[in-house]
Structure formats: structure tokens, C-alpha cells
Image (cartoon, grey):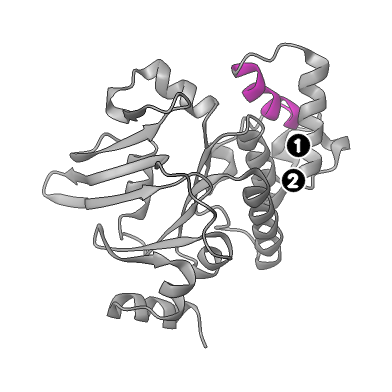
Amino acid sequence: MADRLTENDQPLLLAEGLGKNYGRLTACRDVSFALYPGEVLAVVGESGSGKSTLLQLLSAQLAPSAGRVSYRMRDGVLRDLASLGEAERRFLFRTDWGFVHQDPAQGLRMAVSAGANVGERLMAVGWNHYGRIREAASNWLDRVEIETSRIDDAPRTYSGGMRQRLQIARNLVTEPRLVFMDEPTGGLDVSVQARLLDLMRNLVSELGLAAIIVTHDLAVARLLSHRVMVMKGGQVIETGLTDQVLDDPREPYTQLLVSSILPP
């Protein structure tokens, strides 16, 4: 992807000495970084490297054993996520944040219509006019390349790729500032992956979103991210601009990762 988008002076998300232990097992250790508005960060590594645990810590789904995560609210104040009440965290997820799961069933209500899935998030932020909600849902289905004639169909009638695109629409309809993505193309056919990646790249760029993407697929990182963090054994062992890290990795582990996944 092109060089990183122009940054604001102040970080949107700040991780400081972040760690998570489960008894004697260390799942994540001493992770620190700043994410700026409009920046896309990919967290890569093999299974068990700690990247999914890190994503849960950053999105306040897990409480850290050490360190802290701070988020800059819309009033400009940087708040420690641990200090937020449950209602404040829920409000963040309905407004400022999105979370795209690898399995769309985790991020969608499978028994209600596609339009209701998108509209629910609008109602959660105060929309109450049915016509406006349905129009916005229809517009977003079109944006994620789902035929608007399918607006009243339930996601269980959709293909895997369509479900993932619907999950993206549901997350982006409230114009969040930060989106977390956990293996967003995992489990999809290669041709479906390519279409979804192209859609995601265009939407992230168009909306100026900040995003944190966890993936084992370095091709996904190259296409979508401005910066990469490589994890091994719960630690960040290398970080830098995406092209820099993937084209000229410094660490032997990263070199092995690149050579095994991205053949010359």
C-alpha cells in the first residue's frame, strides 16, 4: 500500500507496556505502540504468537495483566480504557469502533434480515425514522456489493463472502474512527478473498479509517496496511512500514515468515 496517510499530531490509540498472563503462561508481553488517525496497522505472526490476544486487549475485550491501552475520545481527551464504565465501552463499540470477526456469524444476527443487521447499529446511535434507516441500509448493501433486492433476506441465506461483506457494512454504517479486524479473509476461497480485500482497501481509504488487522496472511498485510508489527511468543520482534518489513526483514524469524509465505 502507499506510504502512510498524513498523521494528526496526536495518537488515536496508545498501548503502553501491554501484557497478558494466564497463570504461568504469557500470552502477550510488553507491547507498546501508537496508532494515528487514518493509519492501518497489520499484526502478523504464526498461530500462537499472541496476535489475537493483543487484539482483544486493544479492543477492551480482555483486561491486561500489565500496562494499559488509551483511546482518544471525540472530545480530544485520551482515556485509559480500563477507566471506562461498561456503558461507555458499549457506546464506543456502537459508534467509534467496529469489529470484523473471521466468522461473520459472530458479528451478525443470523436470523434477522440483512437490512435489520445494518439498521440496528443506526438505531443504537439514535436513528428512529424507519424510511431513513432502510435507505441507509440499502445504500450500504450497495457499497459492499450486495444486491439491494436481498435487503430483506437473512444472512443465513447468504454465501460466506456475502456474509463477510454484510458484517463490514454493519460495522461501517455509523462511520467509526477505528476498526478491529480478526483474520477478515480467513476461510474464504481465494477468488472471494481477492474481491473482499479490494473492497476493504477502497472503503478504508475512502472513509479515512484507522484499523488494526490481525492476519497470518502477509499478502493481506501488504495490500491493506501502512505499518506491520511481527509477533512471536507474545512479543513484538519487528515493526516498520509494511513494504520495508516485507521486502527487507531484519529479524531471522520475519525472514523465515516472509520466505515461506511470500515466495520470490
Q: Residues within 10 Å of mark 1 (few under 14, many from 20)?
A: many
Q: Secondary structure at mark 2?
A: loop
Mark 1 to mark 2 CA distance (whole Å): 6 Å
Three-letter code for the amino acid on which mark 1 is drawn? Trp
The quadrant holding residue 236 is bottom left
Q: Which mark is drawn over residue 144?
A: 2
Three-letter code for the amino acid on which mark 2 is drawn? Val
Quadrant where the N terminus lies?
bottom right
x and y percentages locating residue 35 in the rendered image: 41, 48
Residue, far front: 9
Q: Secondary structure at mark 1?
A: helix
x and y percentages locating residue 51 in the rendered image: 35, 54
The residue positioned 42% from the left and 39% from the top of the image is 12
Residue, far bottom: 264
Q: Which mark is drawn over residue 140?
A: 1
Closest to the observer: 152 or 28? 28
Q: Magenta stretch?
A: 112-124
Q: Is the C-beta separation of discs 1 and 2 under 8 Å?
A: yes
